[in-house]
Image (spheres, rainbow, N blue to C red):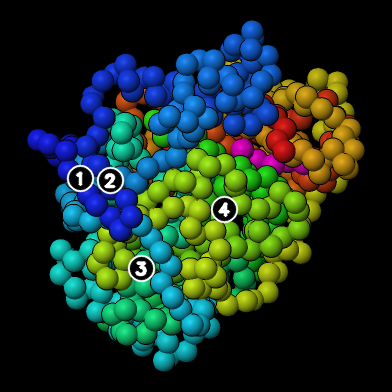
Amino acid sequence: MASLPLTQPLTITGSSTTTSLCPFPRNNSILNTKRREAHVRRSLSSNAGSEEASSQWPQLGKVDRRNVLLGLGITGVGSNPLAMADPIAAPDLTKCGNAELSDGTVLPVDCCPPTALEIIDFKPPPFTKLRVRPVAHKVDKEYIAKYNKALSLMKALPDTDPRSFSQQADVHCAYCNSAYDQTGYPGVELQVHNSWLFYPFHRWYLYFYERILGKLIGDPTFAIPFWNWDHPDGMKMPSMFTSDTSSALYDVNRSPSHQPPYVIDLDYSPSQDAGKPAKPYKQQVDENLTTMYKQMVSGANTQSLFFGGDYRAGEPPENSPGSVESRPHIPLHIICGNENNKNGEDMGNFYSAGRDPLFYCHHGNVDRMWSLWKQLPGKKKNDITDPDWLNATFLFYDENAKLVRVKVAGCLDTKKLGYVYEQVDLPWLKKKPKSKKVAKLAVGAAIAAESTKGLTPLSAFPIALKKAITVKVPRPKKGRSKAEKEEEEEILVIEGIDYDKSTAVKFDVYVNDEDEAGPEKSEFAGSFVTVPHNTKNKEKTYTKLKLGITELLEDVGADDDEDVLVTLVPKSGNVTVGGVKIVYEY
């Protein structure tokens, strides 16, 4: 990122706070200390983290994380020695620089927003009626006309207006393609994907987009639609975005081959599926519903599995995407992007995704998944309580073109933001995958006798994934009781993932499966999927994929096995895997 120079600090006074936009000096010792502090805090943020800290500092034993930090001389912010928080802070807009493509090429467009002399802390505006976000494929002509009018007015605003469509699209570009450093940490990228910031950032993003549209047509009750891709009736691009090329809802940079009547594939892989005939309708629908079950139910039984890894100030995100962020969010981005464009524009690349009006409809359903997940059975299906998540902040321009600072904590309840989603049935709740029962005994016997041929030893990692590989992975615990399973989720971790960020990357993961059964079978654990994007962190970072497998192991009859066979199958892009292991998480 090419930062804009500041000759003196710029102070911005908000409605109740004063914000200094002068960054910390570029002092490597300060930056390294802050990174060390952040690393220790993250290591101690969970039981697993406490064990990690104990192994690095065995003389400490298992003690409270704050006591450890105090012992290391890390006293936090201000006079309170216990005020040790590392929430990601809203970016310094005066330090916004050139956004980049995944290969480091500077984008030919400026994604930076205008700066303002005042930052206002967000307060929910009063409302008398909840906005109801409708199902896109069910809306009537009157609604489509209203949405088209609102978007036409937004597109007619000058590009310098922060409420304009071009500026709204650039919000995603700036936050996702390295235009911002973390405030106070020069050279450390701010990124809102692959971590626990994914859901709250996009919720706030859609909130202000919606409010601006309503303001432009003088209708505070206007609500954007959501693409109901988790329902058989909604598994096509909504016709309101495709049927009229003169509409403001149409985007020329949208895939020509995936327009209706094409039924979208929630597990789409560009190098494997592009150009191939569509699957039979019923097969594709069944596979999509099974994917939704895995990503929302069996594979999302802990907060980190659903939300993604933690992300604290001074360091890159953990790079562990949540279940829905990984699938179907990313495959749908790729499906909608124009495959004839070099970088998959518009939806197929993060920098350009916001230029397609369908983006906001797609993310409406992603946001809806957050609300639905919290309504599913299970004591762990609730919002994160970590202050570093709750106090993370972003900046957006509101419907009055005022620069507003928002907190994650302010968007946990959509009703407090004035909107809800139209209620529809959830057929994926009853679409639990089926196991290939005939293979259970054969696979189990092969593992027990260690007679399976062609296994890759764990010691061989890291491995460039050029072909399918199978590795025997030990299970730390076996034969767990129902109560133990409810208390702790068994998680398969594919770690140290290094990949080519200039292309869409995908590999599939199977457990105790000899012939790659497919996503509709229980042996299919999940996929690693990416959209092309850039990261400019100077320190090498890796990504991890976490897959909940408690229910999977029950279904394939491996509850009492000491080991499982894990198969990694490359689908697209170049990727290296650092290792495979099993852990347990509350």
Magenta extent: 546-550
Relative to 453, 207 lies left or right = left
Crowd around label 4: few <14 · some 14–19 · many ≥20 (10 Å) = many
In the image, what residue occupies the spot 57% across and 19% down?
A: 68
> Mark 3 falls on what kind of element?
helix
In the image, what residue occupies the spot 82% across and 27% down?
A: 477
What numbered label is drawn on residue 19? 2
- Residue named by callout 1: 11
Crowd around label 2: few <14 · some 14–19 · many ≥20 (10 Å) = some
- Viewer-nearest of labels 2 and 4? 2
- Residue named by callout 3: 209
Query: Residue 336, position in %: x, y?
Result: 41, 62
Label 1 near label 2: C-beta < 8 Å? yes
Give whichever of discs 1 and 4 has the lower sequence position.
1
Instruction: Tell me the kind of residue under disc 2.
Output: Thr
Instruction: Using the rendered image of the protein, determine whether residue 344 is visible from the camera's viewpoint.
Output: no
- Viewer-nearest of labels 3 and 1? 1
